[in-house]
Amino acid sequence: MLSNRIWLLFSILLSFVHNGIAGLTSSFIRSEWPSTDIPLDNEAFALPKGYNAPQQVHITQGDYDGKAVIISWVTPDEPGSSQVRYGISEGKYDFTAKGTVKNYTFHNYKSGYIHKCLVDGLEYDTKYYYEIGDHDSARKFWFQTPPRIDPDASYKFGIIGDLGQTYNSLSTLEHYKRSGGQTVLFVGDLSYADRYQYHDVGVRWDTWGRFIEQSAAYQPWIWCAGNHEIEYMPYMGEVTPFKSYLHRYPTPYPASKSSDPLWYAIRRGSAHVIVLSSYSPFVKYTPQWRWLAEELKRVDRKKTPWLIVLMHVPIYNSNEAHFMEGESMRTVFESWFVKYKVDVVFAGHVHAYERSYRISNIHYNVSSGYPYPVPDKSAPVYITVGDGGNQEGLAGRFRDPQPEYSAFREASYGHSTLEIKNRTHALYHWNRNDDGKKVATDAFMLYNQYWGTSKRRRNLRKNRLYSVIVNRPLSERL
């Protein structure tokens, strides 16, 4: 407790030191590991033992409120059973659920048998053990359900984007597993299989599924699609967008009245999480626009005070990579983010880390208003975490000078965590991967937009987000 207070005081001191400047561009220069995919015979992609053993096991939330999960897996040789056996005691499975199975082709690749099973009617805050597969090839896993919907429920999310399957990706995943995160908010660009051709596209989806199983089989990953999931490849005869992604990674979109698996919402503990699709139509009167308009009205901040938005393309970005690509979505949705007081927007796409101040650019029009982003206490914090570690490498060219909306930026690989403490406070960290080591690098206390006092809201002006940039391990700071 004392160390927490010391850290917070240090954070406040640094916020005053930095007061009056636009932000900070880290001087850290990464000694980069090779941005090449892990070889196919590496143990990170190891096949489970046994004939037709389930592989690529992953779960996601299966309903609106966290009392269900969707469990997915692949059997390589034959369909086998789509049954999930589960219970609250290890090795004792009092319940069963029956799923479905399907497969697909992509050029000359034919997938294994992809199983999807909804396990619902679960109790909150309970550890469940589950088993899938047949006979000697059966495999066992577990997951923990979230606390019941409550404004003061504490919960810790991990945030990962643009992961891929390189050694840098492995470093990110291993560090996240030790973070204490309970659910991953994944902001798009999963396997980077589209950087391959023909049969190898499907092969690299399979290796990525086995790669993330070490985390995704034990806790939900909340999926957001990126550009590398589109896989529009006419030269291979493949012109159906998101074909591989939609077959492999289901989402609970009907539970939030969405008409498409690419945009949806969930509630988990004290958080309401909205997932948007940067690569689906979103302008006025499109299905995604209409859905978001209604979903924002359904948000009950008295029950779920934390309002979080996920998208792939950042709408505020000062990197030369993908600069201004999010502008069209910003013009459509930013005013809603301010009106409904979204707490934080997470994005990926840019292979670097960046955090903004609370700013907005909603007052400008062709004849009047502010032509640039301005401090706005009702606006979200925008955070880009497209730094999971893929073969395309880092985006190291930031625009100079650093814009006033940008608080901190660094071209490194890493992951983030958002630890919700109660209805008013959440602790955010970004952790750099430094040659295989986890280094806590950026942190601040996020004050809730709905429950924050008016005095506290006045203190959320630019340069008053209590932040700290340090190079010491997390264990030394907390």
Image (cartoon, rainbow, N blue to C red):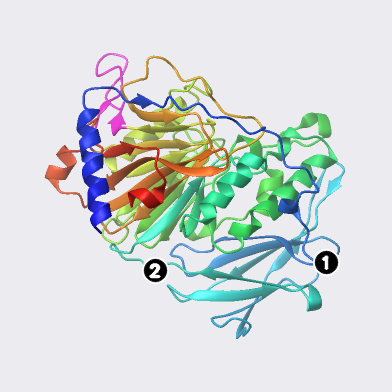
From this viewpoint, is residue 99 visible? yes
The one nearer the camera, 386 or 409, is 409
What is the magenta segment's predominant secondary structure?
A: loop
Q: How many marks?
A: 2
Residue 343 placement (x, y as % from top left): 32, 45
Amino acid type at circle 1 is Asn
Residue at left 39%, top 35%?
333
- The answer to whether residue 276 of the structure is visible from this angle is no
Q: Is residue 380 left or right of residue 28?
A: left
The mark that comes first in sequence, 1 or 2, is 1
Q: Amino acid at mark 2?
A: Pro
Q: Is residue 163 above or below residue 233?
A: below
Residue 120 appears at what percent x and percent y? Answer: 54, 72
- How far across and how far down the image is residue 60, in percent? 56, 59
Residue 107 in the figure: left or right of residue 438: right
* Quadrant where the image shows the N terminus: bottom left
Structural crowding at the residue carrying mark 2, measured as other residues with C-alpha within 10 Å and reported as few (<14), some (14–19) or many (≥20): some
SS at badge 2: loop
Residue 462, quarter of picture: top left
Viewed as shown, does residue 108 lie left or right of 286?
Answer: right
Which residue position is annotated with label 2? 147
Image-quadrant location for residue 251: bottom right
Q: Which residues are magenta?
A: 357-377
Q: Residue at x 30, y 17 (%)?
A: 371
**Label 1 secondary element:** loop
